[in-house]
Every structure is written in C-alpha cells, then in structure tokens.
Image: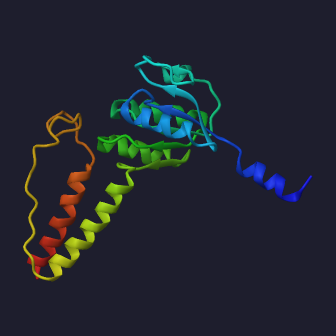
Amino acid sequence: WHKGSRKKQERTQMVKVIMHGCNGHMGQVITQLVEKDPEIEIVAGIDLNDCRDNGYPVFTDIWTCDVQADAVIDFCTAKATDTLLEYCEKRQIPVVLCTTGLTDEQIKKVEETSKHVAVLKSANMSLGINLLMKLVKEAAQTLAAAGFDMETPSSESGRSKRNRPGSGRQPERGTGQRLSLYFRQKSEKRTER
C-alpha cells in the first residue's frame, strides 16, 4: 500500500464522544452538527429526560454509561457538574465543560479535577460572543483613553435564568456580566488618573 494511505486513515479515525445533556437545546444542536461531521460520532448520551431517539443510547444515570469514548461534551445544568467531574476523573475521559452558573466551590472542583484528567471549560462557546467580548474590550480601552465616561446600566433581562442572583447560588460571571466588567474596569482606571 501507498505511504500516504496510512496517514489519511489515522487522520480520519473517528472521535467518539458522550453527549452530557443530550436532550437539552444545546445537546440537540451538537447532535445535529455531529451527524454531518465524518470525524466525530456521539456514541452515547446522558440526560434525565429520555424522551427521543437520538440515534445513540441515552442513559438517565451517568454511572450506568459504560460506553467507550474519547471525550465527554457537556451542556447540562450546574447541579449535574459534580457527578460529571467524578465520572470523567474515575474513567479518565477528557471533558469539554460548557455548563454555566457554577459556584465558586464547583469551579475549584473543576480546577482540582483538571489535575487528573483533561478539562476544557468555557462559559460560552459561541464564536460570535467571544468576538463580541474582544471588540467590547478594545472599545472600552479606546474610549477610556479618549476620556469618555462609560457606564453600563443594570438589566433585569437575565432574571429568569437558573443562575440568577438570589437563586441561592453564587454564579460565575455570565456573558453580560463579563461585558459590563470590561467597561467598569476601564472607566475606573480613567477616573483614578
């Protein structure tokens, strides 16, 4: 056989993932995207809600999922994060953790778990939001340097979210809070001069 054939075979070996939160909105978005990608396959899903046929087995209890996988992609709720981290560490399966609203204690657990198994944590995986964050940061720097007085009004728009203030949890910064923080930091630096 041809030397290049082996390299192509190695590159096209499918990545096998477990979709944690597979029946939620983002779990279904990821499922649809993966169906179109020849290099990745969802081999199992984990979700308390076993209401649909995803084309792969769905486990309502993470500990009963014994399917071999290369990684776990997580779009579940914060209350499921501790068990997910324990599962991934015990089985030595890397995890892409996309759940938001983690408490300070859970963030520490993520850091501790990452010492034993690979963890990629992102509060927002959207390319659009990450680009917006970069642009807001640059705008805040430019406006502060030009002497603009910047202020971000408080908003009640996110109050229906599960990780809202007053829900009994201390959530990590959400997208809106991080955008607001960039402006406040630059505004505070300008007024200190």
Residue 28, located in which quarter of the rendered image?
top left
As drawn, is 166 to the left or to the right of 21?
A: left
Location of residue 76 in the rendering, given as x and y in whole percent from the top left corner: 39, 33
Location of residue 29 in the rendering, given as x and y in whole percent from the top left corner: 43, 37
Residue 48, located in which quarter of the rendered image?
top left
As drawn, is 26 to the left or to the right of 65?
A: left
Location of residue 168 in the rendering, given as x and y in whole percent from the top left corner: 19, 33
Q: Residue at x 27, y 72 (%)?
A: 138
As drawn, is 106 to the left or to the right of 139?
A: right
Residue 181, located in which quarter of the rendered image?
bottom left
Q: Residue at x 41, y 33 (%)?
A: 82
Which quadrant of the figure contains the C terminus?
Answer: bottom left
Q: Residue at x 56, y 24 (%)?
A: 55
Q: Residue furthest right?
A: 1
Choose between 84 and 115: the one closer to the eye.
84
Query: Is 134 located above or below residue 141 in the figure?
Result: above
Choose between 178 and 170: the one closer to the eye.
178
Which color scheme does this rendered protein use? rainbow
Location of residue 111 in the rendering, given as x and y in whole percent from the top left corner: 44, 48
The count of marks equals: 0
As drawn, is 151 to the left or to the right of 182?
A: left
Choose between 168 and 149: the one closer to the eye.
149
Q: Residue at x 48, y 26 (%)?
A: 46
